[in-house]
């Protein structure tokens, strides 16, 4: 954002590159803001240039010749920063899951921070090494640091209350092919660390940062909010950023929030039998098929029901199955619509010989952004060269930051990471 005469030039950004990193970092800087300015989100800044090059005003979308000139500089980071197999790009070697001396790691550039975090992915609730590294970094910046929120969460503050809270996520995605940062949380952590590092040079009034565990399964934020070390803070407002592949690089995406979602797991239990006499058993097939068909042919997009899994027995040719499992994800703009759709999808067995269990999995509330927060962000970006896109519908995915926005005013905004970036 362009410098404002009402705010000291207290931090600088990376030089512009095709990667989304500088844009991400600038947005975190703009979210911090200073209470002496007209709007809550001023972001005075200049490029962080080598000592031999004088700083230039920050223009995230300069004319083509200027962009070409910046990209030709030797300090330009040309490697994309999201969704690539990474290792640290410096000459040092940092083995995964080892304690790294703060004196060494504090010298890393933001891309190198992200590459290191990318190399130590940890599943939800298991973010021990990641949290330890984050806490070491925050202490080296001079923050007051608290660990162990909601498991491995890390809370840090600088300045005096009231606080503006910024949030990033610690966990990676756990899948059958392994654990990895497929949702970009490594980038979120690195840009927030970098913002705190810059801001520590001239500490703002009242900044709190939360590196939250267990976002992927929706369990982390609600537990963090119950921790007295967070709940005792006077939080003025709360903000978070999520990268959005398939959107123009560096574009700020303002939406009303994110949709609520929940997983529904249904288990039908009958009686298995020998395949030579299936009439002696009770097959759950017809009940499962009716429910799965209703999910697969759900006619609406909001609320939306997506069939994600079905299983009937085993591949055992001498046995007719006596148990079946089905799973679906339900999404809706509001919590009320989600609850209503849950009721509609809850099966009612017409066969008294079948037992039916319904379980809730990975619930996420609707994330509802404050209109005042969105307006303030929009007004601030309107004075800059950062592109801003407004949309009347919420993001279709879900976020447990919605729990925080039930308690504090604020917003979760998107940031385009490039049209050709792989999806989350």
Image: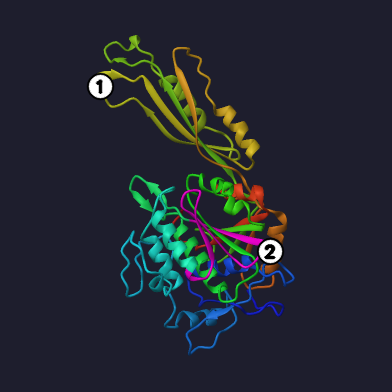
Q: Relative to 54, is 272 above or below?
A: above
Mark 2: few/some/many CA within 10 Å (<14, 14-19, 20+): some
Mark 1: few/some/many CA within 10 Å (<14, 14-19, 20+): few
Q: Secondary structure at mark 1?
A: loop
Q: Is residue 178 left or right of residue 142?
A: left
Q: Secondary structure at mark 2?
A: helix
Residue at the extreme bottom: 52
Give the Cα distance between marks 1 and 2.
63 Å
Q: Which mark is residue 378?
A: 2
Q: Quick check: can you spot residue 406?
A: yes
Q: Is residue 395 left or right of residue 110?
A: right
Front label number (1 vs 2): 2
Q: Is residue 340 left or right of residue 246?
A: right
Q: Is residue 98 magenta?
A: no
The image position of residue 348, as x and y in percent, is 53, 20
Q: Which mark is residue 317?
A: 1
Q: Relative to 46, is 236 above or below?
A: above
- Who's the residue at 39% across and 47% down the image? 174
- Who's the residue at 57% across and 34% down the image? 299
Residue at the extreme right: 38
The image position of residue 385, as x and y in percent, is 63, 73
In depth, the one of 229 and 373 nearer the eye is 229
- Who's the residue at 43% across and 65% down the image? 114
Q: Which residues are magenta?
A: 140-169
Q: Are marks 1 and 2 in contact (CB under 8 Å)?
A: no
Q: Relative to 295, is 231 above or below?
A: below
The image position of residue 393, as x and y in percent, is 64, 49
């Amino acid at each position: 954002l362009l410098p404002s005469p009402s705010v000291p030039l207290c931090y600088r950004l990376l030089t512009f590159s095709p990667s989304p990193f500088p844009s991400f970092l600038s947005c975190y800087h703009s979210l911090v803001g200073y209470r002496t300015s007209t709007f809550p989100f001023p972001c005075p800044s200049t490029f962080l240039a080598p000592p031999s090059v004088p700083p230039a005003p920050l223009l995230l979308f300069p004319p083509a010749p200027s962009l070409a000139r910046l990209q030709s500089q030797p300090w330009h980071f040309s490697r994309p920063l999201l969704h690539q197999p990474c290792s640290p790009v410096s000459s040092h070697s940092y083995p995964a899951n080892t304690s790294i001396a703060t004196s060494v790691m504090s010298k890393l550039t933001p891309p190198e921070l992200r590459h290191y975090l990318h190399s130590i992915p940890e599943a939800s609730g298991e973010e021990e090494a990641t949290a330890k590294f984050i806490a070491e970094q925050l202490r080296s910046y001079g923050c007051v640091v608290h660990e162990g929120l909601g498991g491995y969460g890390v809370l840090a503050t600088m300045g005096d209350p009231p606080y503006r809270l910024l949030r990033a996520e610690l966990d990676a995605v756990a899948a059958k092919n392994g654990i990895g940062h497929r949702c970009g949380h490594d980038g979120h952590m690195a840009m927030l660390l970098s913002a705190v590092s810059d801001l520590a040079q001239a500490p703002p009034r009242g900044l709190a940062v939360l590196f939250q565990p267990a976002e992927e399964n929706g369990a982390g934020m609600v537990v963090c909010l119950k921790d007295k070390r967070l709940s005792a803070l006077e939080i003025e407002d709360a903000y978070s950023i999520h990268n959005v592949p398939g959107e123009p690089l560096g574009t700020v995406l303002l939406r009303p929030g994110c949709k609520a979602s929940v997983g529904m797991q249904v288990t039908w239990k009958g009686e298995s039998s020998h395949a030579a006499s299936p009439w002696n058993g009770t097959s759950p097939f017809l009940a499962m098929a009716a429910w799965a068909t209703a999910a697969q042919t759900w006619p609406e997009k909001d609320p939306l029901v997506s069939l994600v899994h079905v299983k009937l027995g085993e591949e055992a040719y001498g046995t007719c199955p006596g148990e079946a499992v089905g799973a679906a994800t339900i999404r809706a703009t509001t919590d009320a619509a989600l609850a209503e759709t849950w009721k509609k999808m809850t099966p009612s067995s017409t066969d008294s010989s079948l037992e039916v269990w319904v379980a809730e999995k990975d619930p996420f509330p609707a994330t509802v952004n404050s209109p005042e927060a969105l307006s303030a962000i929009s007004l601030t970006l309107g004075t800059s060269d950062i592109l801003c896109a407004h949309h009347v519908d919420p993001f279709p995915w879900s976020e447990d930051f919605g729990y925080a926005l039930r308690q504090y005013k604020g917003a979760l905004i998107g940031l385009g990471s490039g049209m050709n970036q792989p999806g989350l």
